[in-house]
Image (cartoon, rainbow, N blue to C red):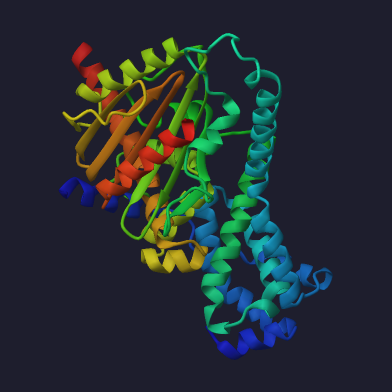
Amino acid sequence: MDRSLVERAQRGDREAFTSLAFDLSDRLFAVAHRILRDFDSAGDALQVTLLRIWRDLPSLRDPDLIEGWAFRILVRACHDHLRRQRRRAPTLRLMVDATSEPDPAIAIADREQLEAAFQRLPTEQRAAVILHYYRGLTLREIAEVLAVPIGTVSSRLHYAKRALRAAIEADARRAARKGHSA
Amino acid sequence: MTRERDFDDILAAWLDEGVDGAPERFVWAAIDGLERTPQRGRWAVSIEEFLMNLKPLAPILGVIVVAALAVAGYQAFWASDVGGPTINQRLVTEEQLPLIVLTDENAPDGFTVDEQTALTGREALNQPLRPGGAAIDTPAFVDALSVTGGDEVGGYQTWTALFETPEAAEAAFDFIVTEHDSPEGWNLAAVKTDPGLGDESAAWTGQQYDFTPNARTIFWREGNLLLAVVGFADWDADTVTALANQMADRVD
């Protein structure tokens, strides 16, 4: 990330911020889409995030840390979005707007179980899973991005993984029981 | 361990499916909004962060005030009533649950509490049981609370579930013990030494199938309340015991 671009945007340069926004938006949108499991919701979260970045950019002390700071704002925007959504109508969405090809190594049943279990996770656990398994961040890096201690990141990852894995195992056990009784 | 690796691969592959590029219209919509969004200085952000940090403490402060009023009321009207009826089976109330599990205030040094991922109600009730099997399902259930935390060594879960009567809690305790000792449970080995907590207690340790290489669970019942501490990953035996003892003290 171009440090001078960030510094110019910090001083209120809209042209610089526009370049910065386009630089960041692909990575932010990809994470928002995976947390929220919905294209338009991810778009909303991205817009909110970009506006909050612009608004609070003068408070960023080290311009080199812009990306991690932007992810923290994004996770908060996703959290707010999910909270509002749950208040209105709790629903289970299926992410049908993926553009990349589904991985054939993942069974259809596993994918459905993962999707359902993932949507039951709190935003903070979803974010930890995505930053670790999708963005490839270490536990310490996630701790810095989310501004929480490393033990909290371990705990969030542990329980998220446990819930996701349990969903697949529970389904396999149900199928096995059906097989026995048939 | 192999299946653990497999699951990590499945998760990573599943997360790879999805959109990678942001449609420009979303970015332009934000750029259009800059006109109406003034930038703000460091001091404004600092004040907002301070207020946000206070916000999660509000319910805890509320509970403390209610509990303090209840204690004061009890002392004023009941405690002085020498010779009055004695309570053989003390009942814990719903308001006390947040004071029993881990909180920022009662956590040991170096410990962080993840209050944002706390679970309540029926979602929390069956948290200690292996998903997919039978669940505790009784109309006498009142509320449950599950709070996780961790330090630089391992992760820990503190859990409590409230029932209307000690008899209902006793039935739920028996259910948990049976489930843990059966193939439907987490595949942990029962610890022969009774932890000696509350009215009845039990502990298990070992590998949760191939999920968590090492876990330790302590369950106990105190009147109409069930409690548990679970240590996972690189849990420390002294920490698990200390957390359980502290929870037991808070119930007392």
Q: Please name whichever residue, B216 or A154, is drawn nearer the observer in this view of the structure.
A: B216
Residue A108 appears anywhere in the view: no
Q: In the rendering, at what x and y percent does residue B108 appear?
A: 42, 52
Q: In the rendering, at what x and y percent does residue A16 appear?
A: 67, 84
From the viewer's perspective, tell me whether residue A75 is left or right of residue B227.
right
Q: Please name whichever residue, A31 or B98, is drawn nearer the observer in this view of the structure.
A: B98
Which residue does the image show at 42% across and 60% down from the upper left?
B110
Image: A159 above or below A68: above
Which residue does the image show at 55% across and 57% down from the upper left?
A32
**Across the whole image, how many numbered discs are drawn on residues?**
0
Q: In the rendering, at what x and y percent does residue A135 appear?
A: 41, 64
Give the quarter of the image for residue B85. top right
Q: Single out the residue that lies furthest toward the right.
A: B36
Image: B41 above or below B246: below
Which residue does the image show at 49% across and 23% down from the upper left?
B162
Q: In the rendering, at what x and y percent does residue B224 appear?
A: 46, 18
Give the quarter of the image for residue B134. top left
Which residue does the image show at 63% across and 61% down from the upper left?
A46
Q: Single out the residue that lies furthest toward the bottom.
A: A4
From the viewer's perspective, tell me whether residue B8 is left or right of residue B108.
left
Image: B105 above or below B34: above
Residue B5 appears anywhere in the view: yes
From the viewer's perspective, tell me whether residue B204 is left or right of residue A164.
left
Q: Please name whichever residue, B103 or A71, is drawn nearer the observer in this view of the structure.
A: B103
